[in-house]
Amino acid sequence: MLFATRQNIYRNAISSPMRRLLSICALILCACQSPAAIEPMISGSSVEDDQIYAADDLAFYTAMNDANTPEHGKAPALRDEKCALLGESFAQAATIGAAYGAQSRLGNAGMPKNARQTTEGYWVGAQPMPSEIDELHARNIRVVVTAAAMESDTFRAIKSKLDDHGIRHINIPFGGRFPNPKAFYQTIHAYTPDQIYIHCEHGGDRSGAILAYLLVVDHGWTIPRALLAVAFPGKNDSKRLIELLKTRGFDVSQPDIDDYLGIYSAETNGGYGGLKVRSAGYVKLINTTIDAALRELKHKM
């Protein structure tokens, strides 16, 4: 419950206008940080990774939410400012995503925030509201994988609605460390990808990590391509991810960057967010995702 608890502390302790100002400042600071600043993160940190992850993720998504209308459409002026902040790679990823991105983008009536469907069939998005589960069922989703902790009342309401529809629920909340695949991998194999909805709170980092894992172990993607595909395509985040992958010994070619960066992120498919590289918590999430995928690939050999 760490992630949910820290969110409540932040939300209750800071007024909405002040939180908005602080969140936008945090976003600008993170987005403009030099890629060289990732080095101490790669080499390890004694800081509580999940706490850093929770704080950074809350700041990022609060700022991103302020750049969107309640209907998930973009507020043009704020969106333009955001594009200018993110740099050329955002525009590049948006262009690529139009050709190679998720086959079903945002704007699906009744679906959770940031919901999109990959070419392989997987649905990925934010935590559903109980009222949105009817639409999940209508789209033939038969299992929901939850990667974020929820408050007990919210959890009970969602679980009850899932049970009403006969939708299986795999509850594996995590923060800065990828979960043991045994908690979900064998179970979801009873379903086809188009029957699976993967979500965290916002549909970016943790759900992106699970999707990347599945793309590698079940669909033959390389690790760099899978992580690039779910990545938040901001200029500095993409540079940090590429540097991290190279540090792990992977070759990251420019054609792969051009063709895959952000194509399965919400950012490139009409929403906001994706797998980011902002702190030790994010780096740990990516590294443990890589480790889990490599172990499964070795097991399959």
Image (spheres, rainbow, N blue to C red):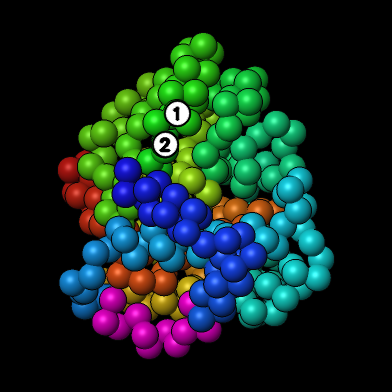
Q: Give the secondary structure at mark 2.
A: loop
The mark tally for this picture is: 2
In this picture, residue 275 sits left or right of residue 79 = left
Q: Amino acid at mark 2?
A: Glu
150 w.r.t. 269: above or below = above
Q: Does the stretch in magenta take in 32?
A: yes
Residue, x 23% and y 35% (percent of image)? 182
Q: Which residues are magenta?
A: 30-41
185 w.r.t. 178: above or below = above
Q: Does the stretch in magenta take in 196?
A: no
Instruction: Decide which of 233, 16 is in the foreground and name it.
Output: 16
Q: Residue furthest right?
A: 76
Residue 126 horizontal/vertical position (percent): 54, 43
Pointer 2 with pointer 1, Cβ within 8 A: yes
Identify the residue under disc 2.
151
Residue 37 horizontal/vertical position (percent): 36, 85
Residue, x 27% and y 75% (percent of image)? 42
Instruction: Decide which of 292, 25 is in the foreground and name it.
Output: 25
Identify the residue under disc 1.
153
The C terminus sits in image quarter = top left
Q: Counting other residues with Cα less than 10 Å from the Cα at mark 2, is it few (<14), some (14-19), or many (20 or more)?
A: few
Residue 289 horizontal/vertical position (percent): 30, 54
Q: Amino acid at mark 1?
A: Asp
The N terminus sits in image quarter = top left
Q: Counting other residues with Cα less than 10 Å from the Cα at mark 1, is it few (<14), some (14-19), or many (20 or more)?
A: few
Prevailing SS of the magenta stretch: helix
Residue, x 48% and y 41% (percent of image)? 199
